[in-house]
Image (tube, rainbow, N blue to C red):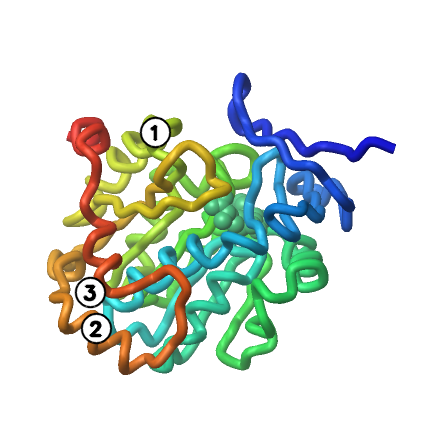
Amino acid sequence: MSKKHYLETLYPTWGQNFVMDEVLFEVDTGHQHLVIFNNAQWGTVMALDGVIQTTEKDEFVYHEMMTHVPMFAHGNAKKVLIIGGGDGGILREVLKHPEVESVTQVEIDQQVIDMCVEYLPNHSAGAYDNPKANIVIADGVDFVNECTEKFDVIISDSTDPMGPGEVLFTSRFYQGIANCLNEGGVFVAQNGVSFLQTDEVITTHKRLSPLFTEASFYSAAVPTYVGGIMTFAWATNNLTLKHVDLDILEARFAQANLSTRFYTPALHQACFALPRYILDAIK
Ligand code: SAM
């Protein structure tokens, strides 16, 4: 019997195609369509609403760059907030930093957490049972607008700006972020593949700029976020955070004594250098 295929539908006229060797789980959660399947090239894959979210093989690229760039730039983040991140990869990486006292994760869909713990156990790798982790099931836009706590690093690991994720790219969400970011803190967010989703970069830059002294981006090439480099939004009122000396980054990295497979201090410094087409787009 021929195997089923998963066609990513993020782009109407082009996309990646996965042979599904085995469908492990599929459901409409009430928030989104969730499917988890095995693929010979990428291992176990999770997709939401037709968009690839994470794969066993390349998840470390995204989760390390989304976490360690803000964490090592800040250097002493005691309180961290994650929006989204249901697969648990960001939570796992944040908890590797010894200075962290508490991580609050606000995820809208409990089933994403439950199914990823079951079928992608190495993503969270026990992080959900860590006493420092405080898991809140809620819409991130409501949480940040009602929250009275403040955080040193805020990471928005959301789906694309459609369905439940759409609100996490609005000015109302960014205003909420500004309200709950500590003095000297930094906010980062997944902001799409800039070559194909350039409008997302432009829109995010327009919406963040009035709220923060610095609104910029950094990048990394995540293999299954197809189309070139993935762009991460960077927003802070502390202009020094983007320019931490390499020897300080190296000292912080050595001090944290955590293992990575993609992130290095040198790559941290380099990832803020943006291609001309992005610089022109956000001018
Ligand atoms: N790494 C993926 C990417 O870059 O596309 C995203 C990973 S993670 C699976 C995205 C998470 O955002 C999902 O667990 C989804 O349920 C969650 N999410 C979407 N909209 C949300 C909202 N408004 N509030 C909180 N979590 C949300």
Q: Quadrant of residue 228?
A: top left
As drawn, the label of residue 184 is 3
Q: Would you name the residue on which mark 2 appears? A: 250
On screen, residue 258 versus residue 44, left or right, reads: left
The residue shown at (55%, 54%) is 57
Badges 2 and 3: C-beta atoms under 8 Å apart?
A: no
Q: Label 1: state its secondary structure.
A: loop
Label 1 lies in ligand 1 vicinity (Cβ under 8 Å): no
Q: Position of residue 25 (x, y in %)?
A: 77, 49
Q: Would you name the residue on which mark 1 appears? A: 195
Badges 2 and 1: C-beta atoms under 8 Å apart?
A: no
Q: Quadrant of the C terminus?
A: top left
The residue shown at (48%, 51%) is 140
Which of 166/6 is in front? 6
Q: Label 2: state its secondary structure.
A: helix
Indicate the amino acid at tag 2: Glu
Which of marks 1 and 2 precedes in the sequence?
1
Estimate how packed mark 1 is, as few (under 14), some (14 to 19) or many (20 or more) residues with alpha carbons within 10 Å: some
The residue shown at (38%, 64%) is 148
Q: Position of residue 257 (x, y in %)?
A: 34, 81
